[in-house]
């Protein structure tokens, strides 16, 4: 069963994902993938959209290694898929204007392209803050009947989830959780301490990286968006704990590396203080690969069974800012989904 995928934004995450697909098709496995009826080898990127002239018109094999991408080259990418000139949808300003070299090629019709290629799943990998573009790509995806996965903080699932539900088309989001990033690690540590009877009182997290996403987050309004989403996610897992978390700086020579620093304070026993200082070093692009490959396959399973909208068990498991948090176990939900007959 082939899963036809469209990528929106051929940046660092797209580079890692496309390379991972080459790796699994070469016979190697990925650590942490969920076992599903659809295998990762069946995932095929059939089109991609971008606005940067250094990527538009190139094959994916060339574009994923073009500036300003900084993900390491782990494998040769043989994909002949050509990157199309997507609509700009909103002004390019601020730091982003200094990063992107806007293409002068004619913008394509996204909806018609998705229909023509019979795309199953659209992955939104645009930078944080590209709200207008993210929402418009989602609307185009809905019109084409393609499932939509929103990796960005833009509240796409919150705003359009009901429209997708009525149409029987899946919309999964918002703001992807990394496989082993600072936010999920931070929340898990707090959960562990609380399970051991520690009263966690306050905590903070700072992230430093050298990717384009880290660079554009230097703008105060983008930094506040990411800080709010990360802090709210961790707080939702640790009620009553004072939490501050967010990207703090850009260091160019780090490239795709991310340094996360966490401090957690609390008391245990008869009020004795405890403090944990954690340093986590990861690579941003590869951190998104396993969750995305799970979500692509889950979106296809949902789509084939006519299950639309933003199922809470999926969104609350894979995203920092889901439309609502679910108490339903994701494993139980997926078993129930797979028991249904495709429509």
Image: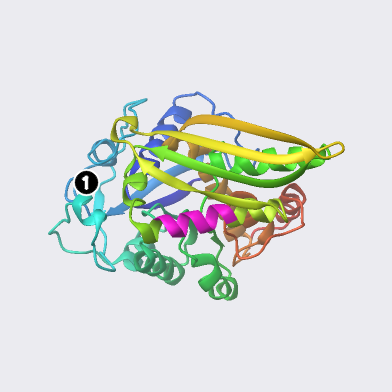
Question: In the picture provided, is 239 more to the left or to the right than 297?
Answer: right
Q: Position of residue 297 (x, y in %)?
A: 56, 47
Q: Position of residue 243 (x, y in %)?
A: 61, 51
Question: Relative to residue 8, is residue 64 depicted above or below?
Answer: above
Question: Relative to residue 280, is residue 332 depicted above or below?
Answer: below
Q: Nearer the viewer, residue 247 or 326?
A: 247
Q: Nearer the viewer, residue 313 or 144?
A: 313
Q: In this figure, which residue is indicated by the disc labeled 1?
A: 55
The number of numbered discs placed on residues in the rendered structure image is 1
Q: Nearer the viewer, residue 274 or 174?
A: 274
Instruction: Name which quarter of the figure residue 321 lies in.
Output: bottom right
State the extent of the magenta-drawn residues as a range: 223-231
Q: Position of residue 144 (x, y in %)?
A: 42, 68
Question: Residue, x 34% and y 37% (percent of image)?
Answer: 210
Does 343 lie within the magenta span? no
Instruction: Name which quarter of the figure residue 93 lies in.
Output: bottom left
* Residue 100 visible (yes or no): yes
Question: Residue, x 53% and y 57% (percent of image)?
Answer: 229
Q: Secondary structure at mark 1?
A: loop
Which residue sits furthest right? 270
Question: Residue, x 39% and y 69% (percent of image)?
Answer: 140
Q: Position of residue 1 (x, y in %)?
A: 54, 45
* Residue 41 visible (yes or no): no
Quarter of the image with the C terminus is bottom right
Q: Nearer the viewer, residue 149 or 306?
A: 149
Question: Residue, x 72% and y 56% (percent of image)?
Answer: 240
Question: Relative to residue 190, is residue 112 depicted above or below?
Answer: below
């Amino acid at each position: 069963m082939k899963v036809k995928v469209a990528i929106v934004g051929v940046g660092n995450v797209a580079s890692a994902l496309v390379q991972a697909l080459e790796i699994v098709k070469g016979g190697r496995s990925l650590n942490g993938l969920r076992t599903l009826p659809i295998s990762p080898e069946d995932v095929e990127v059939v089109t991609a959209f971008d606005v940067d002239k250094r990527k538009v018109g190139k094959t994916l094999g060339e574009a994923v290694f073009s500036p300003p991408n900084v993900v390491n080259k782990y494998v040769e990418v043989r994909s002949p898929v050509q990157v199309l000139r997507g609509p700009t949808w909103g002004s390019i300003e601020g730091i982003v204007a200094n990063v992107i070299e806007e293409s002068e090629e004619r913008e394509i019709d996204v909806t018609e392209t998705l229909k023509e290629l019979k795309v199953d799943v659209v992955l939104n990998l645009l930078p944080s803050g590209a709200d207008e573009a993210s929402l418009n790509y989602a609307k185009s995806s809905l019109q084409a009947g393609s499932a939509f996965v929103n990796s960005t903080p833009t509240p796409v699932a919150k705003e359009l989830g009901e429209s997708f539900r009525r149409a029987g088309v899946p919309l999964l989001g918002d703001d992807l959780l990394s496989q082993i990033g600072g936010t999920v690690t931070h929340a898990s540590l707090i959960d562990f301490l609380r399970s051991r009877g520690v009263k966690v009182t306050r905590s903070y997290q700072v992230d430093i990286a050298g990717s384009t996403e880290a660079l554009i987050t230097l703008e105060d309004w983008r930094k506040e968006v990411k800080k709010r989403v990360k802090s709210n996610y961790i707080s939702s897992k640790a009620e009553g704990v004072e939490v501050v978390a967010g990207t703090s700086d850009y260091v160019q020579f780090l490239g795709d590396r991310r340094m996360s620093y966490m401090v957690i304070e609390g008391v245990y026993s008869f009020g004795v203080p405890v403090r944990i200082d954690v340093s986590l070093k990861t690579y941003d692009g590869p951190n998104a690969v396993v969750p995305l490959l799970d979500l692509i396959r889950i979106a296809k399973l949902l789509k084939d069974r006519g299950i639309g909208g933003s199922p809470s068990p999926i969104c609350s498991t894979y995203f920092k800012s889901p439309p609502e948090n679910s108490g339903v176990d994701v494993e139980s939900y997926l078993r129930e989904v797979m028991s249904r007959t495709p429509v």
